[in-house]
Amino acid sequence: MAPILHLVRHAEGEHNKGGDAYLIRDPLLVKSGLDECRLLSDNFPYHSSIDLIASSPLRRSLYTALEAFKPAISRGVKVVALPELQETSDIACDTGSEASELAREFAVELGPSGPVVDLSRLEPGWWVKKGRYAPSSSALTARARDARRWLQARPEKEIVVVGHGGFFHYLTEDWTGIGDSEHASSWENTEFRTYRFVSDDDENASIIETAKSRTDRGVTGRLPSREEQEQLYLKVMQYWESRGFQNPLKMEG
C-alpha cells in the first residue's frame, strides 16, 4: 500500500523578506524560522509514526527537516534529499548548492544509525535549472509526477515531505487559495497538510488531501475537478506574472 504523506513547507529563510534577498544563493533559515521549527515540532502529531523524511535539497528545507523532526530522527528516521522537490524558479534563492558542499555541511548530523542526511540522489549539477529541472511548466509538471512516483513506490507507511510553497502546488496539483494573500503560494511557513494516494496503480501517482487535514485547517466545500484545477492553473500563472514572479508557461524552450 502506498504511504501517507505529510507535506511541510520550510520555515522562514533569509530570502523571505523579498527584494534583494531573493538574490541570496541557497539561503539559510533565520532566527524566526528556527522558532517556527520548534513550534512545528511541538505541535506535529505524527512524530511516532513517520518512518522517512524526504526533503528538498535546498538548505532551508534540510534545516527545517533537521530542526522540526528531531523526535523522529532521534529514533533513526533518515532525511533523504530528493532533487525533484527543489523550488520552481531559477533565481538565486531557489538555486541549490553543490552536493560536495552539502556533504561537508551536513556530515556532522549523526543519528543512532549514522549520518542523518542521505545525499546519494544528488547527481552532479542537480541545482542547474535546465532540462528536467528547468523552470518551465512542462518540466515542473513532469518532475512533480516523478517525485510522486518515487514517494508512491517507497515501502514506508508514513513519510514527511519537506519542500516549497510554489512546488507543492505542482506536487499536489491543487491551485486553490493562491491570490487570497500577497504570497505566491497558499502554503504558510511550516504549514503541514496530509495526503493519500488516489490509487496504488495510478500512473500519474495523484494525491489528495485527507478529509481530516482539510477540516483541521478550516477548509470546507468540495474539491475542484481536474478541469477546474487546469483553469485555476492558468489564472495562477497570470497572477504570478502580475506579481513579478516567473510564469512557467512562458519559460518553455
Image: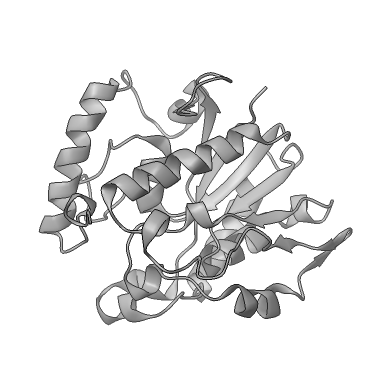
Q: Quadrant of the N terminus?
A: top right
Q: Does residue 45 appear anywhere in the picture?
A: no
Image coords of residue 228 (percent x, y): 21, 25
Image coords of residue 58 (percent x, y): 51, 66
In the image, residue 24 above or below residue 37: below
Q: Nearer the viewer, residue 169 or 210?
A: 169
Horizontal arrangement in the rendering, residue 136 relative to residue 198 (left or right)? left
Horizontal arrangement in the rendering, residue 188 relative to residue 213 (left or right)? left
In the image, residue 236 above or below residue 82: above
Residue at position x 23%, y 56% in the image: 253
Q: Nearer the viewer, residue 177 or 1?
A: 1
The image quarter in which residue 175 lies: top left
Image coords of residue 203 (percent x, y): 48, 25
Q: Does residue 235 appear anywhere in the picture?
A: yes
Image coords of residue 68 (percent x, y): 63, 57
Residue at position x 44%, y 56% in the image: 189
Farthest residue toward the right?
112
Residue at position x 23%, y 23% in the image: 227
Horizontal arrangement in the rendering, residue 49 relative to residue 166 (left or right)? right
Q: Nearer the viewer, residue 70 or 82?
A: 82
Residue at position x 51%, y 24% in the image: 212
In the image, residue 206 above or below residue 235: above
Horizontal arrangement in the rendering, residue 170 relative to residue 48 (left or right)? left
Q: Nearer the viewer, residue 21 or 125?
A: 125
